[in-house]
């Protein structure tokens, strides 16, 4: 039985002050059996870490660089995040791939560095609309999964404990166009098959696979009914306390 995970990806939203306001309300409203992760922008990480002390809310970064330190202007390393008390990091988000040119190779380096430090990686994959329409979604997602996990062995992610996959079809991100539960389930099951081929069925059964792309309070339950959907990575709807509570609150 996999524990559901709901992760808030705030993207480039919320000042430190706004983050504190959000969390002071959110943490008092939170209950349920799911794991909850909040990923604010770097500038709000300190405040969020402070606000979530002694709560079950885990804190994640939206990005991190694989080198520990040095002349990398504008970057924040996985090692620095780990030292500050961050436990999770999103890697391979389509916005990082598309806007900032992150390649599968760089994503592999980031995943590897984060896992070495004991961070839990939320590894995002997903296809653009043209790829879906040409019938190539699963092949593309499989190639992203294999490339990102290239040369990474199961012991590096605690045989499933510290690796979370997130399937985020790019055409569903921020568009209000959610994948149907069936469309998502098909790809999630396919991802689990790839993980099984790489690491064996036992490890694949332990890895949580989240869906992301226009998840809202009114569509999350249908997605969560599917056997291979283990939670959600939520953008827009995670910015409102009531909406994110409604998404992570129920006992799935
Ligand atoms: P939206 O929930 O705003 O579609 O964003 C999804 C996403 O990209 C989460 O990482």
Image (spheres, rainbow, N blue to C red):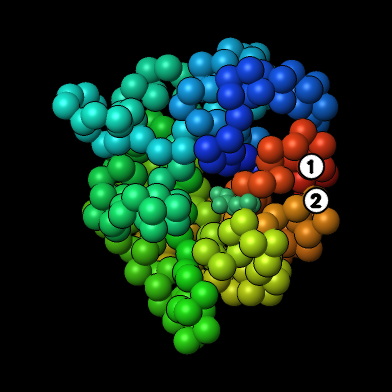
Could you tell me which secondary element the residue under label 1 belongs to?
helix
Cβ atoms at labels 1 and 2 below 8 Å apart:
yes
Q: Above or below — where is 86 with respect to 181? A: above
Local packing at callout 2 (Cα closer than 10 Å; few below 14, some 14-19, many 20+) is: some
Which residue is depicted at the point 25% across and 45% down? 109
Q: Residue furthest left?
A: 71
Local packing at callout 1 (Cα closer than 10 Å; few below 14, some 14-19, many 20+) is: some
Which residue is depicted at the point 46% across and 19% down? 85
Which of the 4 quarters of the picture holds residue 149?
A: bottom left
In the picture provided, is 194 more to the left or to the right than 78?
right
> For disc 1, does the CB lie below 8 Å from ligand 1?
no
Name the spot of residue 249 as percent of width and height, x first: 80, 39
Could you tell me which secondary element the residue under label 2 belongs to?
loop
Q: Above or below — where is 147 with respect to 75? A: below
Name the spot of residue 5 as percent of width and height, x first: 63, 43
- Which of the pair 209/179 is nearer the observer? 179
Q: Above or below — where is 36 with respect to 166? A: above
Q: Residue furthest bottom?
A: 134
Name the spot of residue 161 as percent of width and height, x first: 49, 41
Which residue is depicted at the point 40% across and 73% down? 140
Q: Which residue is mark 2?
A: 217
> Gap in Å between the C-alphas at discs 1 and 2?
6 Å
Q: Which residue is mark 1?
A: 243
Question: Mark 2 or mark 1, which is nearer the start of the sequence?
Answer: 2
In the picture provided, is 233 more to the left or to the right than 190?
right
């Amino acid at each position: 039985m996999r524990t559901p995970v709901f992760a808030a990806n705030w993207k480039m939203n919320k000042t430190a002050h706004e983050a504190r306001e959000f969390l002071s309300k959110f943490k008092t409203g939170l209950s349920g059996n799911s794991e909850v992760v909040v990923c604010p922008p770097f500038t709000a990480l300190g405040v969020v870490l402070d606000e979530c002390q002694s709560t079950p809310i885990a804190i994640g970064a939206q990005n991190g660089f694989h080198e520990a330190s040095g002349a990398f202007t504008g970057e924040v390393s996985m090692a620095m995040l780990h030292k500050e008390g961050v436990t999770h990091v999103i890697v391979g988000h389509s916005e990082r791939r598309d806007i900032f040119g992150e390649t599968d190779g760089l994503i592999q380096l980031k995943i590897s560095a984060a896992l070495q430090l004991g961070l839990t990686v939320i590894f995002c994959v997903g296809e653009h609309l043209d790829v879906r329409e040409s019938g190539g979604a699963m092949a593309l997602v499989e190639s992203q999964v294999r490339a990102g996990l290239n040369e990474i062995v199961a012991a590096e992610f605690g045989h499933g404990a510290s690796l979370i996959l997130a399937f985020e079809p790019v055409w569903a991100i921020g568009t209000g166009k959610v994948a149907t539960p069936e469309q998502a389930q098909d790809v999630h099951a396919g991802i689990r098959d790839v993980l099984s081929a790489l690491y064996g069925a036992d490890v694949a059964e332990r890895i949580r696979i989240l869906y992301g792309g226009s998840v809202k309070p009114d569509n999350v339950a249908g997605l969560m009914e599917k056997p291979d959907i283990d939670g959600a990575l939520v953008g827009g709807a995670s910015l409102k306390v009531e909406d994110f509570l409604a998404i992570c609150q129920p006992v799935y």
